[in-house]
Amino acid sequence: MKLLTVIVLLPLAGFLLNGLLGRRLGRTFVSIVGCGLPILAFLATLKAVLLLQAAGPDAALLEVAYRWASFGDQGFDVAFYFDRLTAVMTLIITGVGSLIHVYSTGYMKDDPGYARYFAYLNLFLFFMLTLVLGRSLLVCFVGWEGVGLASYLLIGFWFEDPAKAAAGKKAFITNRVGDAGFLLGLFLLYWALGTVNMDEINAAFAAPVAPAVSASLVGVLLFIGATGKSAQIPLHVWLPDAMAGPTPVSALIHAATMVTAGVYLVARLHGIYEHAPEASQVVAVIGVLTAFFAATIALVQTDIKKVLAYSTVSQLGLMFLALGVGAYGVAVFHVYTHAFFKACLFLGAGSVIHALGGEQDIRKMGGLWRRIPLTFGTFAVATAAIAGIPPLAGFFSKDEILWFALASQHGGSAALWVLGSAASLLTSFYMFRLLWLTFLTPSRMSHDTEHHVHESPFSMTGVLIVLAALSAIGGFFELPHFLEPLLPIPAVAGSLEHYEHTFVFVAVAVALLGLAAATFMYRRGLARGEALAARFPRLHRILGGKYYIDELYEAVLYRPLHWVSDRVFLGLGDRLLIDGSLHGLAALTRRASGRLSRVQTGQLQWYVAMAVIGVVGCLVWVWRHG
Amino acid sequence: MADTQLLLGLSFVLFALGLVGVMVRRNALVMLMCMELMLNAVILALVTFSLETATLSGAVLVFLIFVVAAAEIAIAIPIVLQLSRQRSSLDVEGYDRLQG
Amino acid sequence: MGEATWLNWLLWLPALGMVAVTALPKGRDSLVRSVTFGCMVLQFFIAAILYQRFDGTVAGLQFATDVPWIRDWGVGYRIGLDGLNVLLVSLTAFLGPLVVAGAWNAVHKDVKLFHVMVLFIQFAMLGTFLAQDLFLFYVFWEAMLIPMFLIIGLWGGERRIYATLKFVLYTAFGSILMLAALIYLVLYTHGSSGYMTFDLRHLSGSQLPLNTQLWLLSAFALSFAIKVPMFPLHTWLPDAHVEAPTTGSVILAGVLLKMGTYGFMKLGFPLFPEAARAMMPVIMSLAVISIVYGACLALVQTDIKKIIAYSSISHLGYVMLGLASLDLIGIQGAILQMVSHGLVAGGLFLMVGMIYERTHSRAVADYGGLARMLPVFSVFFTILTLASIGLPTTSGFAGEFMVLLGAFNAAWPAHLAGNDLPLTLAVIAVSGVVLGALYMLWLAQRILFGEARAPHAPLTDLNSRETAILVAIVVAIFAIGLFPGDPLAKTELAASEFQQRVAGGTIQLGSAR
């Protein structure tokens, strides 16, 4: 039996069943199919992991499904590849994915598009599994674009609202920009190596004879693809808008799985980046800048989901920072811990929104801890985890990222460490701000809302508890070590070798500092925060306006494109030059014919005279030339 | 042979008369008659050559021209009649509605 | 050769259908439709059998017929299937019944004449693809104009006369040049080899001086480029599409446009290989300009049909880019992209026709929220939109991906050799992928999403006839997208022969390492 193929196809079956029959067969059927097949996929993954473990640390399972197309002696196979890296990703996707499916049965209970929702969610899982299990870049690209599609459909799930539909479109198109880079990288690799199988690409770059292509160029091109999918500067603009989708979608797609695809790609192709210091430098710098700037924006957001969205962008930046300094395993470690606590946070936020009947503004919350204690408890654990408070999961992964940002011999530097730590400080601050304003400060809810507050059903809180537990203990699993046979851990600069523990204390101090500052500012409510904003109005406006990147793109890219298309291409090119010259030609012909037609006077004698002249002319010509 | 030259000369004169007549006379009926004159000139020339070369093809062509001439008159006379009924004049100057 | 009979049946069945429909009594409209439809279905089955039995591993013509026609000129009735036309013939036969079914309720004026014309154009299109004789090719090529002229001119929209004249004048202008060039070519071959023939196999062996080749190729290319259409000869297309009835648009987008690219592939490049190589930078540039220009113009249209029309210009630009890359993958991709575009654009035009029958409006601004009002319609429209964008697993992706890969494969060695033009063009072409998503999603967003509104609401969703048509198209789209290996295996040999002939032995292109 082809186990890997089955893992991929199970959610597809769910999509087809729910999509085609779901509306007719009712909610129970939809729930069973929608949750059951991902859980089956999870179990199948566990079995695959067992097989893999039995085969040894750097072994891999390989399955060729069929040949997609062949050209001469070359071709593209649809093949699946399963090693430890894939195993981690697949477990996260099917595991967290299944949990979120279960949560959704509660969250989406009353939505008229219930069947459609689960169909899309299963479709997403199918493409996501294609992405991580695909052996070749081409199969990976299929999943890559496919998750974009699922994301598009789910962001615009409530499509009656034009803003939500527009957010979906924005996500798709921004991703497409990245995809163009991905494609170019893929083409270049195919030209140079004649294969796009990722294991073979890594092997080719590790070979003593270097491939006939610049690793840095390929690395940067593929990284452009990663910036699109993982919302890094300059293609980060779509992710905050993507919060228009249902909250479980934000948890699954825009926090735990899809957005980490870029990280996965770079980690998977570490063979290229190890030999591309320039490209790695680019990855690290973009990553740390994204981490820092997204964190600053998150400071002033008032929508609970927007705060989490920018926090996701920021955390993804940290992951790229790790990738850029060669700590691939550590980046995957953060993917793994982040999946737990960020999913928990988003689902907790969903529970809050659910409890408040759709309210998302944290300025209108407060005092919820007493009313929805389970949600509060799990949210608090996850907040502490993301802030990096030991011994929760986030602490381990983040600490290692910052350590390698400083100490790695593969491009680590003090500047990266400073910015990374600053981002970490800000993260701790705004997350505790969120916690205070949502749950702990005195209530600012309207009386009406307050009356309706209720804890979510067990299908939702149960999932929260599981995720909170994983956020708490997940860090004790030494993932970088587990992955070391595949993803090497970079060497540490000699001068810093003995200071690792010192920096652990610094990291903890940074997290606690953030906690303390947030407590000082927001313990009593909004007042101190607003006073600070009033002291620095311009800074506050810039942060609130997200550095006006959207407006910039609108003014620099979209509007000129429209203007050129409309005025230059359509108006000047098509209408004036091409059609104009054609119509001109037609008019000219008509006028010239009009002139010529005057020869036809209608006078018989004139015609006869012309005929005679013609005949005489012919005779003369024959006489002269004959 | 003198006869041949004479006959050809006569043919030429007849043709020229007909051509000039078509070109200068304004009366449609007269123009038709002039055209007949030209055809007859051609017939004369053909018969002459037929005699000269002692073949029959010239004579055969004469019959063809007869047919054409008869057909032409059969169509032309009704047209002329219609025109004269419309305008009670046969002056071709007046008929220029075929101009472009 | 019993097998050749099947191919003759395929070609002549629409002609027989024309006779049969003409002979039907007046006023029996549904009978006319049924006979036409039956004829098309029968034809589709014949094509399916031929496709199955076509052997991709054998070079040259299969199921060929070669009967002298005009002996003195060396003109023959020569038809046959080869790797270059097998997919396009199948596509034509596949779309035939769908076109008739799509027009079931759309035409009420002169129903008989309409269906005769549909059969006529089917006959002429199949003939053009199958012809292996230059004279026969030209006859069929010109014959296509007549039914199209009438279909747009009689059953079209308000400005149909302007549109149909523009279409015919543009095309006829190109055809005249092609006629002159092909007569010159035949006479030249006559002069050098001593016997006169229009047989393509003989003509493609003639060695012409480069200068002559350039002139002749320019004449052929102009004719084909108008049909494709390539920038800047494209302005007839949007007008023709907007004014044409649905049937006309579907035939136009589905098959007729491929005549141009097929012409390049079958005649233009292989007959004049040296000239083709010399002109490749120009052709490639125009192809890429078409891609971007078409996409940009699609972005600013307000008429749904015009958006799809301009998107056709863009998509056929990819086909030309693939052919011009002279890389095996690119050529294969171009062939696949032709088929894919036929399915996708044909399907989109059918859908526009379906909604137009309900609302009598094609303005984007008139619509919104159809996803709520017409869920089935919206599902199909979304799928076709995504296929048009070239989302993986659809046929659009397979074609586009291979074209771009081929273009890049050809461009990178050129770049290393110091010629940056192909690389620049390839990179710009890749950016067309973004533009494609931009205009199609923008269209989908505005008509499918948002607040529900449409003229003549409430509307009824697709009926089973319409659903069946679209299911057929969607299945084909996914079949090609997921399993392109089978069709590609049928065309591979012909494509590599084309590549070797045109690229020649001197320039080493392709994925060389």
Image (spheres, coloured by chain):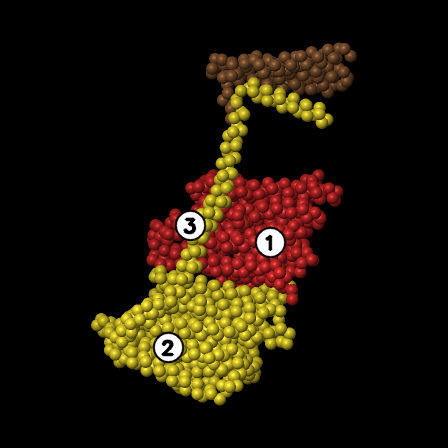
Chain colours: A yellow, B brown, C red
Q: Is residue C336 above or below residue A45?
A: above
Q: Is residue A423 above or below residue C429?
A: below
Marker disc for residue C303: 3
Name the mark nearer the viewer: 2 or 1. Answer: 2
Q: Are marks 2 and 1 in contact (CB under 8 Å)?
A: no
| Residue beneath the point at 52% across and 16% down | B92
Which of the 4 quarters of the picture holds residue A170?
Answer: bottom left
Q: How far separated are the C-alphas under marks 3 and 2?
A: 50 Å
Q: Which mark is residue C281?
A: 1
Which mark, by number, is residue A25? none
Q: Amino acid at mark 2?
A: Leu
Q: In this picture, is A479 found above or below A273?
A: below
Residue A426, which numbered label? 2
Looking at the image, which is closer to me, A299 or A412? A412
Check the residue under mark 2 and report the chain it is in.
A
Count of marks overlaid on the render? 3
Crowd tier of the residue under label 2, counting other residues whose Cα lies within 10 Å: few below 14, some 14–19, many 20 or above: many
* Residue beneath the point at 43% across and 59% down: A557
Location of residue A542 by image quarter: bottom left
